[in-house]
């Protein structure tokens, strides 16, 4: 794998975007969008996270194996959340106590 | 075969002497032996607790120990056996020793981290020991809240911290193996030429790395709730005790695959060598290891069917639990097909393999019984469950571990164990095991609850059988402990390849040199290629 | 002066393999950290889905400006860290030490702000286990929010502290000339760890500070 050097200039673009997104998420957070608030906040957080992972952490230029490792970690967390929520969110669906 | 004398060749044991050369070693082989000594210690300690439990259960009333002491006994038995023995057992001993050798590497990717992981293990174990000496815990190895956070007055935090620390040892071992297997295979050793032991170690490492952190943070939260009163699971604040169970079992179910997968890897090796045949359906067995690792993460709710988990979630988990049995079954079928028309020799490792296949099948099938919602409601928290998991962990993993120890003992030590005594103890273990745990299936079905220290009269006969079996089983474990140690001094000198087995680890001396191989091997054949061995044999 | 070719460990065939293995190893470790924090994110998700009003109410007791400033500070520290990696790769030793120093500075600033926030919450009687006196709307669930808040920010802060330690060691080694364009792997993998610490906060901020903020106006 060739040594890919990312310049400070490239980093600064990412940096500026991150600050901008932080500003946006804070401002939007103060508005009332109802259920959209959490969606917007999380979408922006994910975009910021992607910028950090792809460019600050060099995943964009890394091997498939490293990319897969990132995906696996996130996927496993998603699995934990998803199956736990299938329990938590479906409690009380049946008309029996405790079910 | 020319038998070299141990004295004249430099090997990893004779390369350096002195306590420092062991305690500061970076050699994966020495680290494996450090682990071997420590986990053996914890095994016998856990066994002592089991002995006292079985003695108490000889009679219906609780007359040997107090109720709380009994709770502490089964808790410590579980904690020590699961976290300090079974989880590290095969990976940290046989895995550490043979993963680099079987892939033709000089060491693991991160030898210093390997040594660190042993020290972390010792620190965690010392913490648990200290807690035990101060009075132990009575929460069960499962630490369910809110008992463990709010009501227990035993050393929950200290024990929890010990397990937390030991968990990092497991994570680091898994991390080391994954990087090593990906990046350090010898030239020519493609993924599908790897021995199946490596495939199972790889799958095991995936589970260690993905699952352990979750139980670590969960135990941390219990300690934090108990210590700082941050009531995360406190029902009075709206906390959810079942949430604890979700987090706990997210790791602890896959943990059972951490325990059994390495054993399955050993069985693949042993069944092949002692039938002189390559493993039937190599790719199926390889993929089944990874499938077990992945599917094993989808089924944890089957430990919570009666815990007020929603019915829908229970249905989902029950359904998925049947799937995880499939790759295990594939392995059993493939091992059987390997045996078919093989040239079978009944050496001790093979005897343990036979034991494994039979007992694991029973354990695994009873797992599917438990996955069945209706049946589980009847037998949950009874001895049926206890019998099920002991069939897998003891009848499965422990037998495979013993089989692997016998198989690889000549390579590790340069000595043969005494075959007669070894065969005898394998038989004693098999008989003792079944006498101990089969009656427990009946007990559970008849309604004997687990973790109870007193019981109705009608159950006594089964308990007596079980305790009798346990004493036989104990003998079966003590004999190998004795002859293995004996063999270090008086055992026959082992040749480089006593079993005439394929595999890179057999192509170097017994014991191996510090760098494992004089020259890095280049692999050109498939795994389990016996035809090459036939060509190489002289006379 | 370190001889960089001696940095090759005996178990590896070449420097390329060693670097690949080290980076891969750090990524696996970070995956474990995702799951480590993830357990608490799971608790958070369950409780927030159950008690949205209480969580929204509780969130309004956190200082939004301080939270946003903390977020910005960590992002700046990530930027300086990335610049540090660049300096290592281009052999600019003084710049490397400088950027590492800046990163540590911003990390310390983050911790100072964090501690002052905690102190304020303690004074307001919103620190479970030490001083929790809130009695208005839904106190049990509000307390649960703060249990989660302190647990998660506490774990995060411990990671920041460990990160400062790691970066300090790296800065000292860099100062002594241990790194150059042919060998700066420890800087890279320390950088990966540091960016991860930033990543966790990128999620903590909206989840804790931005719930139902509009109520505050």
Image (cartoon, helix red, strand yellow):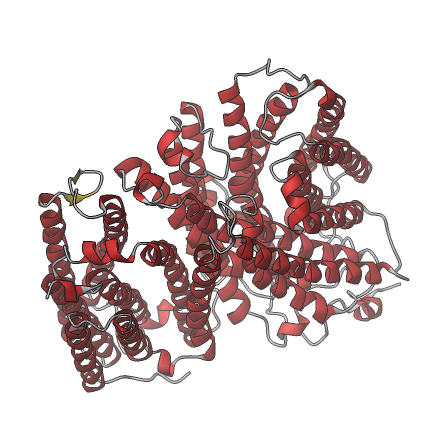
Task: Relative to C27, say whether C47 is above or below.
Answer: above
Q: Position of residue C168 (x, y in %)?
A: 19, 59
Could you tell whether B330 is left or right of C127 in the image?
Answer: right
Q: Nearer the viewer, residue C141 or B39?
A: C141
Q: Position of residue B89 (x, y in %)?
A: 58, 45
Could you tell whether B321 is left or right of C59 in the image?
Answer: right
Could you tell whether B157 is left or right of B96 in the image?
Answer: left
Q: Nearer the viewer, residue B232 or B313?
A: B313
Image quadrant where one finds the C terminus of chain B? bottom right
Task: Relative to B117, say whether B236 is above or below.
Answer: above
Report how many numbered discs are placed on residues in the image.
0
Image quadrant where one finds the N terminus of chain B? bottom right
Q: Position of residue B180 (x, y in %)?
A: 51, 65
Question: Quick one: which residue is furthest to the front in this view?
Answer: A95
Could you tell whether C124 is left or right of B360 in the image?
Answer: left
Task: Relative to C1, say whether B336 is above or below.
Answer: above
Residue occupying image coordinates x 56% and y 38% = B81
The reply to whether residue C100 is visible in this rendering is no
Q: Nearer the viewer, residue B90 or B370?
A: B370
Q: Quadrant of residue C73?
A: bottom left
Residue occupying image coordinates x 72% and y 74% = B525
Q: Position of residue B357 (x, y in %)?
A: 77, 50
The reply to whether residue B182 is visible in this rendering is yes
């Amino acid at each position: 794998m060739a040594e890919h050097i990312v310049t400070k200039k490239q980093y600064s673009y990412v940096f500026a975007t991150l600050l901008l997104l932080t500003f946006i998420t804070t401002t939007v957070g103060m508005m009332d969008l109802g259920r959209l608030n959490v969606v917007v906040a999380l979408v922006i957080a994910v975009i910021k996270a992607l910028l950090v992972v792809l460019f600050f952490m060099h995943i964009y230029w890394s091997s498939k194996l490293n990319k897969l490792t990132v995906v696996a970690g996130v996927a496993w967390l998603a699995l934990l959340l998803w199956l736990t929520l299938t329990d938590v969110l479906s409690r009380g669906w049946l008309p029996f106590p405790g079910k | 075969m020319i038998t070299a004398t141990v004295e004249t060749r430099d090997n990893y044991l004779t390369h350096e002497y002195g306590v420092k050369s062991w305690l500061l070693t970076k050699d994966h082989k020495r680290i494996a032996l450090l682990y071997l000594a420590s986990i053996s210690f914890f095994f016998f300690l856990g066994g002592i607790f089991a002995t006292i439990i079985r003695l108490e259960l000889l009679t219906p009333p609780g007359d040997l120990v107090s109720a709380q002491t009994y709770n502490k006994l089964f808790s410590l038995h579980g904690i020590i056996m699961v976290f300090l023995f079974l989880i590290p057992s095969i990976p940290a001993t046989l895995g550490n020793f043979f993963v680099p050798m079987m892939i033709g590497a000089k060491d693991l990717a991160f030898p210093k981290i390997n040594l660190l992981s042993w020290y972390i293990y010792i620190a965690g174990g010392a913490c648990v020991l200290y807690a035990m000496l101060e009075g132990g815990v009575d929460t069960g190895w499962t630490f369910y809240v809110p008992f463990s956070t709010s009501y227990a007055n035993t050393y929950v935090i200290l024990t929890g911290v010990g397990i937390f620390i030991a968990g990092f040892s497991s994570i680091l071992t898994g991390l080391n193996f994954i990087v090593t297997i990906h990046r350090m295979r010898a030239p020519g050793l493609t993924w599908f030429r790897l021995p199946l032991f490596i495939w199972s170690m790889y799958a095991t490492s995936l589970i260690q790395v993905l699952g352990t952190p979750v139980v670590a943070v969960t135990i941390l939260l219990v300690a934090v709730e108990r210590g700082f009163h941050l009531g995360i699971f406190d029902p009075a604040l709206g906390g959810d005790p079942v949430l604890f169970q979700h987090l706990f079992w997210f790791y602890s179910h896959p943990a059972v695959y951490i325990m059994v997968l390495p054993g399955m890897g050993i069985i693949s090796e042993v069944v092949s060598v002692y039938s002189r045949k390559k493993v039937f359906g190599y790719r199926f067995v390889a993929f089944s290891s990874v499938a077990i690792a992945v599917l094993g993460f989808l089924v944890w709710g089957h430990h919570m069917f009666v815990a007020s988990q929603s019915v829908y979630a229970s249905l989902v988990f029950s359904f998925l639990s049947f799937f995880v049995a499939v790759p295990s079954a594939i392995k059993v079928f493939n091992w059987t097909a390997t045996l078919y028309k093989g040239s079978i020799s009944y050496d001790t490792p093979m005897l343990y393999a036979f034991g494994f296949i039979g007992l694991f099948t029973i354990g695994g099938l009873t797992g599917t019984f438990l996955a069945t919602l209706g049946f589980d409601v009847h037998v949950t928290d009874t001895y049926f469950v206890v019998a099920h998991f002991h069939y897998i962990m003891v009848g499965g993993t422990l037998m495979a571990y013993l089989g692997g120890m016998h198989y690889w003992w000549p390579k590790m030590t340069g000595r043969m164990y005494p075959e007669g005594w070894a065969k005898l103890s394998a038989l004693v273990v098999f008989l003792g095991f079944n006498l101990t745990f089969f009656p427990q299936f009946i007990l559970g079905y008849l309604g004997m609850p687990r973790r109870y220290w007193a019981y109705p009269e009608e159950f006594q006969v089964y308990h007596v059988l079980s305790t009798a079996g346990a004493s036989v089983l104990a003998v079966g474990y003590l004999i190998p402990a004795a002859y293995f140690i004996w063999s270090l001094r008086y055992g026959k000198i082992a040749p480089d390849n006593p079993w005439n087995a394929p595999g890179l680890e057999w192509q170097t001396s017994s014991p191996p040199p510090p760098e494992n191989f004089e020259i890095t091997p280049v692999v050109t054949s498939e795994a389990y290629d016996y035809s090459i061995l036939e060509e190489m044999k002289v006379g | 002066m370190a001889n960089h070719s001696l940095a090759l460990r005996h178990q590896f065939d070449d420097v390329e393999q060693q670097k690949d293995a080290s980076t891969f190893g750090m990524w696996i470790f970070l995956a474990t950290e995702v799951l480590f924090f993830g357990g608490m994110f799971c608790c958070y998700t369950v409780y927030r889905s159950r008690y949205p009003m209480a969580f929204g109410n509780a969130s309004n007791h956190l200082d939004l400006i301080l939270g946003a400033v903390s977020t910005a500070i960590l992002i700046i520290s990530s930027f300086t860290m990335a610049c540090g990696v660049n300096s290592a790769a281009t052999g600019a030793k003084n710049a490397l030490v400088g950027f590492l120093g800046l990163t540590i500075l911003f990390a310390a600033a983050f911790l100072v702000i964090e501690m002052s926030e905690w102190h304020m919450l303690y004074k307001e009687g919103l620190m479970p286990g030490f001083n929790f006196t809130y009695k208005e709307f839904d106190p049990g669930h509000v307390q649960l929010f703060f249990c989660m808040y302190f647990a998660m920010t506490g774990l995060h802060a411990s990671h920041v502290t460990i990160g400062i330690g790691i970066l300090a060691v790296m800065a000292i080694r860099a100062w002594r000339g241990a790194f150059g364009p042919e060998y700066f792997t420890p800087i890279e993998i320390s950088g990966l760890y540091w960016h991860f610490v930033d990543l966790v906060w990128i999620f903590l901020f909206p989840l804790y500070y931005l719930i139902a903020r509009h109520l505050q106006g």
